Amino acid sequence: MTSDTPPPGDRPFEEPAYVPPAPTPYTYPPPQRQRPFGVTLLAILDVLAGIFFLLAAVGSLLLSAVIDVQEWIDQLGPDFPQGLIEAIPFFFGIMGIVFLIWAILWFLIAYGYMKGRGWSWTLSVVLLVLSILFSVIGSVSTGFSASGLIGLLVGIAVPAIVLVYLFQPNVKAWFGKA
């Protein structure tokens, strides 16, 4: 020890120099997924289809409730099968339930489109493929005519265009399918 240095017990307490804490790194929020415009358009069309099917369901169910079977029997006569006439309200009731199920499906798909749910993409693909299949089956079963051919082309072209759109990379990414 030197003579200038006080003994260890006599040294004044020195506070260490202030060191600021390390800054916390800024975490950016995850980027928001951007819904493609075509998906929004398809959702709007699906809502319109759902409204159409809902109105058809209400109309069919109302018809099943108000059809007067006896009036139909009187108009068609005794030669027409009575069991077929008596089944008309039941037929309209079943059609009303089918239309209601379709309306619910369209509304669900529209919701899934807006939220980017993968199940709505899958359900849409299945329904579009079935639509093409039923268009072909319907055209074959009714025979080929000029108007039937136009209906077949539209029945295949529209779902096919939507299918091609749904398989675009940015659209699949919106639904988490990429």
Image (cartoon, helix red, strand yellow):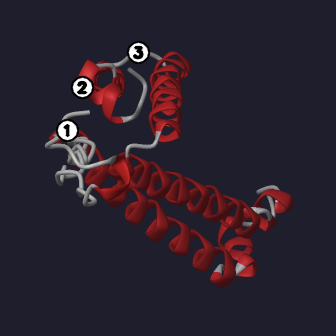
Residue at 23 percent of width and 45 percent of height: 22
> Is 119 located above or below residue 150 in the figure?
below
> Is 75 located above or below residue 79 in the figure?
below
> Can you give x and y, in whole percent of width and height, for residue 76 in the image?
68, 65
Name the disc covering residue 144, or none: 3
Q: Nearer the viewer, mark 2 or mark 3?
A: 2
Q: Residues within 10 Å of mark 1 (few under 14, many from 20)?
A: some
The amino acid sitting under disc 2 is: Asn
Q: How many marks?
A: 3
Residue at 27 percent of width and 19 percent of height: 169
Query: Are the two marked residues, 1 and 3, in contact with CB atoms closer than 8 angstroms?
Result: no
Residue 151 seen in the figure: no
Mark 2 and mark 3 lie on one chain; the one further toward the N terminus is: 3
The residue closer to the viewer here, 78 or 33, is: 33
**If the image is split into quadrants, where does the C terminus sit?**
top left
> Can you give x and y, in whole percent of width and height, for residue 167 in the image?
33, 19
Q: Secondary structure at mark 2?
A: helix
Name the disc covering residue 36, or none: 1
Query: Are the two marked residues, 2 and 1, in contact with CB atoms closer than 8 angstroms?
Result: yes
The amino acid sitting under disc 3 is: Phe
- Residue 114 lies left or right of residue 57; in this view the side is left
- Furthest toward the right, the residue is 83
- Residue 169 lies left or right of residue 176; in this view the side is left
- Residue 114 lies left or right of residue 71; in this view the side is left
Residue at 48 percent of width and 23 percent of height: 129
Residue 64 seen in the figure: yes
> Is 12 located above or below residue 2 in the figure?
below
> Is 45 located above or below residue 135 in the figure?
below
Whole-Å distance between the Cαs marked 2 and 3? Answer: 39 Å
Q: Nearer the viewer, mark 1 or mark 3?
A: 1
Name the disc covering residue 170, or none: 2
> Can you give x and y, in whole percent of width and height, for residue 139 in the image?
46, 21
